[in-house]
Image (cartoon, grey):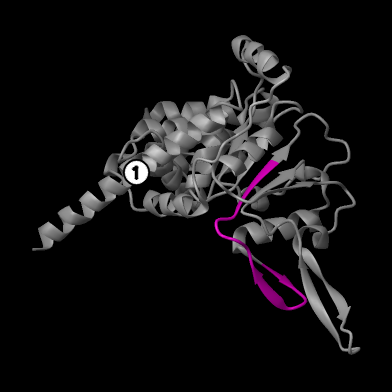
Amino acid sequence: MAAEGVEKLEDVIVRSAEQVADSIKTAREAVGTIIFGQERVVENALVTILSGGHALLIGVPGLAKTKLVETLGVTLGLDAKRIQFTPDLMPSDILGAEVLDESTTGKRSFRFITGPVFAQLLMADEINRASPRTQSALLQAMQEQHVTVAGARHDLPKPFHVLATQNPLEQEGTYPLPEAQLDRFLMEIDVDYPDRDAERRILFETTGSEETHAKAAMSPEALMTAQRLVRRLPVGDSVVEAILSLVRSARPGPDGGEGAKHIAWGPGPRASQALMLAVRARALLDGRLAPSVDDVLDLAEPVLKHRMALTFSARAEGRTVSDVIGQLKSRIG
């Protein structure tokens, strides 16, 4: 009897996964009609959202980071808003504030006006330009899914995702995110230049008389169903062991072998959790019912890169975090 129950549960998961995979494939194709030459970026952004997390997009200006967030908002049916971070931005500009209202009878009362953080998909543009106090206000909302203003709690919409961007070039007048706050992001996604063919297509598609617009492919309810399903997908022992080996070897200590001597500090258990969710989400995105060790290796860098730092001597030798992660991956794969 118990075996029959397990089989029925597996059948339900399989059917649900097939339906969700079709919806996600449609959404992915819809994004692809607007964003060209950034397939890996689009995939990682969708993996982050399916995992229920937030992403930090790193890239020079003009690589369609803002366009990507707008397109994802339309495609996934989410209420999307954008904040341009500047040094004079205050926490209340993000969270909202209470204002004093006076009725026709002369009675006064406070009314809460919501800020742009009350969105399902929030783009935090150039997050490192705002002061640490303002950054903290957003990052607290990301972690706790609610804000507190004047002692009153206000829950954020569901789902709630932040895609923050950061410009790697202009470092003057910026406030780099502290390590503890970087850890709030499930992934750091590097946005590189498109290849020649993709850039050729961009020229023709975006400078003509007609502009292609994104189309809705999912609803917020369907997205939340997919997020719940991600957490139910089975994960094999080999994948779990690969996650544990990789994350533990990215810390200073005996687990890292030869590469550990280059690491000043490494990822905590939150990185293991992020990688576990991300590999499941990637499997579902590809229409598979279970993740593989290849998923772990492919997602290792975006999940771990912002959660570790190298020693001074390693940096002096010209080593990078990507190099060290590549070395650690070679021990597994």
| Quadrant including the N terminus | bottom left
Percent of width and height locating residue 45: 56, 38
The picture quadrant where one finds residue 210 is top right
| Quadrant including the C terminus | top left
The picture quadrant where one finds residue 70 is top right
Residue 251 is at least partly visible in this image: no
Seen in the image, is 71 located left or right of residue 242? right
- Nearest the eye: 114 or 126: 114
The picture quadrant where one finds residue 73 is top right
Task: Label 1, secondary structure: give it.
Answer: helix
Magenta-drawn stretch contains 44:
no
Percent of width and height locating residue 212: 64, 27
Q: Which residues are magenta?
A: 147-164
**Which residue lies most toward the left here?**
1
Percent of width and height locating residue 125: 75, 42
Magenta-drawn stretch contains 149:
yes
Q: Residue at x 79, y 29 (%)?
A: 169
Q: Residue at x 87, y 78 (%)?
A: 100
Seen in the image, is 46 located left or right of residue 18? right
In this rendering, is residue 313 above or below 73? Answer: above
Q: Main secondary structure of the magenta part?
A: strand
Residue 35 is at least partly visible in this image: yes
> Amino acid under label 1?
Gln
Q: How many marks?
A: 1
- Nearest the eye: 35 or 151: 35
- Per the image, the residue denoted by label 1 is 19
